[in-house]
Amino acid sequence: MSESESSSISSRIAALAEDVQAEYIYEEARLEALKAARKLLAKLEPPMERMAHDVLLWYPHFMALRMGVQLEIFSQISKCSDTGIHLNTIAEKTQASPILVGQILRLLAATGYVDQHDVENFKPTALTMIMVDPVIEASTRASFDLGLSSTMKAPEFFRKNNNQFPGSISNTPLQLALDTKLTIFEWLGQNPESAKDFQQMMKLRQQVTSNWVEWFDIQRHIIDGSEPRSPENVLLVDIGGGEGHYLRQFSEKFPRAPGRLILQELPDVIRGIQSPPEDVELMPHDFFTPQTIKGARAYFMHWILHDWSDENCHTILAHIADAMKPGYSRLIIHEQILPDMNCDAEAAGMSIIMMVQMGALERTETQWRALLESVGLHTIQFNRAPVSGEGIIEAIK
């Protein structure tokens, strides 16, 4: 390619970048454009540069984000959009070394998380304003303190166990990272501040995940064909549904849906619900024990089974299958459905996280079928969300 042709390509890319405003692009088109842009980046980035970024540079970037939260760098800069704030002022407010703060700010500026307005003066960017959100701050702490620490210990863990998949939730790289024999859930129960951060991270994931109520045809799959409203008939049981986020949205969209709505959670979670959704019954329940609601129209689970190994999932699903009314009840599983080929990095990475923290994994369509058939259930349909790797797996007895 000639020098003039190379210059022309650079100019065209720069002009396109100036024209694009993500907020004015339809979501599906934006995602397709993002895929195309990543392919372009792969073409422009030599393999050696890509390797250097992935192997040598990614972990200081994450450390800088974590320190940006810890040193309140984002919070301080976000308040100084007009004049900016001096490096020394940031250091003084947190009693941190100016050299340390300068190191962190240099990398944050290079990656667009702050704007270096002058030699030692910094202003906020759009990413700065995102990072001051308390949910983002908590998610950053949880991702670094739990997620990164577990993945960093994974090579050592697998070297010691002859490179075998973790045998249980109590024997994963997380135990090695935290120097504990507790499972992640038990450890969080004894570390309330970390538990709060973890819950905020789950809240963030809910915010950026397609809501099944908005895209799944609930009317056709659940409401149509359900039994008439009565004190006995249960329309939907949300198993392990937290504080009822999805049932609240279900009830708002289908206020006249026939049958009872039941939220099942562990007793401590039920006791802690401050504002339960209207028209939703709260029921203490451990999904490793027999399902007490028999013959409901639908049993719903979101982000439950990816926390557990196949053996544990078999136990959970067997209890639900025992309670289902043949030909009538539906099991609705809202989870990742990984493709057998060409999986995107986000979904593949999430499966790694589940492995190193919980001895579990995200599953492919083939793996979902095998798991459900192992408890006598048959998949009716795999319904993929329009703009994410998640979907709905619908099964009957």
Image: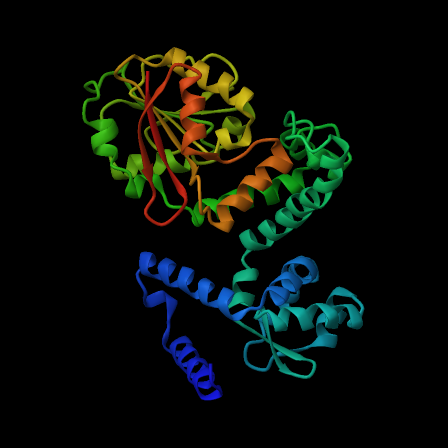
Q: Colour mode? A: rainbow
- Residue 367 in the image: state x and y as whole percent: 45, 29
Q: Residue at x 29, y 43 (%)?
A: 215
Looking at the image, residue 19 sits to the left or right of residue 122; the answer is left
Q: Residue at x 45, y 63 (%)?
A: 39
- Residue 262 in the image: state x and y as whole percent: 37, 24
Q: Is residue 287 above or below residue 157?
A: above
- Residue 256 shows in the view: no
- Residue 321 shows in the view: yes
Q: Quadrant of residue 312?
A: top right
Q: Quadrant of residue 194?
A: top right
Q: Nearer the viewer, residue 33 or 209?
A: 33
- Residue 222 in the image: state x and y as whole percent: 25, 27
Q: Residue at x 60, y 50 (%)?
A: 138
The tally of labels here is 0
Q: Nearer the viewer, residue 57 or 139?
A: 57
- Residue 153 in the image: state x and y as whole percent: 73, 42
Looking at the image, residue 38 sits to the left or right of residue 233; the answer is right
Looking at the image, residue 126 sits to the left or right of residue 34; the answer is right
Q: Nearer the viewer, residue 276 or 180?
A: 180
